[in-house]
Image (spheres, grey):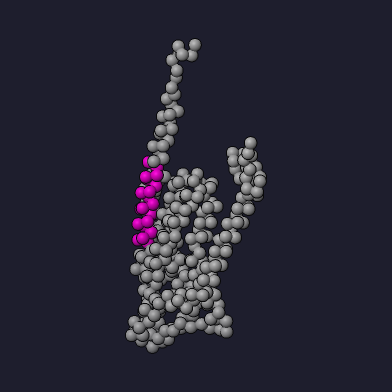
Amino acid sequence: MALGLGRGGRKPGPGGEMPLLDHLAELRSRLFKALAAVAIGVIVAWYFYPQILDWLTAPYEQVRPALEAEGIDTELIVSGIGGAFQFQLRTSIVAGLVFSSPVWLWQLWAFVLPALHRHEKRAAVLLTATCVPLFLGGAWIGYWTFPKAIELLVGFAPEGWTNLLNGADYLSFATRMIVLFGVGAQIPVVVVVLNRIGAVSGAQLIRARPWIIIAIFVFAAVATPTVDPVTFLFLAIPMSFLYLVAEIIARVTDRRRGRTEQRWDDDEASPLDAPEGLND
């Protein structure tokens, strides 16, 4: 008779639970795979650095003629002996994290979800397939609004002055804009996961909708690095729409869950008793 052994030949715990050492071994394995994917992504980004730099500075070059027409000279610079190397390294790391995001997101969900969902692999694939397009879509909106933010903030320089943009500051600003919009697009994933684990219901989300929408607008106003209302609206409106989509998904999930529980209750409440004559 075959023994039900866990990974490494260990017996599973009560109820088929994985022993602590196996959890640690799995965590180490997934961390190694995630870090290896990030390292490969950084190497690829380093190789394609010129193309990435052109893409990164395109919003700046787009608004530069308009700023010069207003009498504002502006230049992108790097300072110090190692400034160019540090800028290329930081750019490659950020791009490598983005390139490898499908892999390390998969490793994250694949490790966390077994405690939350029966079909671990299927749920991990589904959530990863949802998170990545949402993040990329949000990042694209952030990149699209980036020129408007540059024109607004650099435009505060007095006429006739030269605005020198340090490469490190420019990269930090661009990363904040792109990542902020990408993370903001993850709100439906968070809401759906909370609903699936029973932390919130669709009815609770409906009741809290006005306050959540207000919180989204406050978050967008505080988090965006510009002071204009246009940029924060580009973040707040898509987040609000995605929250409403997640609310609909949660309500549908609650209905399905309710029908399943009702069938279980009906099965338990109506046992089939054999006639007394057949028991003799």
- For the stretch drawn in magenta, what is the main secondary structure? helix
Asked if residue 144 can be seen in this view, the reply is yes
Seen from the viewer's position, the closer of residues 127 and 66 is: 127
Q: Nearer the viewer, residue 54 or 152?
A: 54
Residue at 51% x, 60% y: name it: 103
**Which residue occupies the foreground of this view, 22 or 153?**
22
The residue at the point 60 percent across, 53 percent down is 26
Residue 252 placement: quadrant: top left
Q: Position of residue 46 (x, y in %)?
A: 52, 74
Q: Which residues are magenta?
A: 236-255
Q: Quadrant of the N terminus?
A: top right
Q: At which x and y percent is residue 75?
A: 44, 84
Magenta highlight on residue 239: yes
Query: Can residue 20 be seen in the rendering of this structure?
Result: no
User: How far from the left and from the top, in percent, is residue 146?
Assistant: 39, 72
The x, y position of residue 138, in whole percent, is 40, 63
Residue at figure coordinates x 40%, y 77% from the top left: 58
Give the answer, above or below, for where 59 lies relative to 244: below
Residue 194 in magenta stretch: no
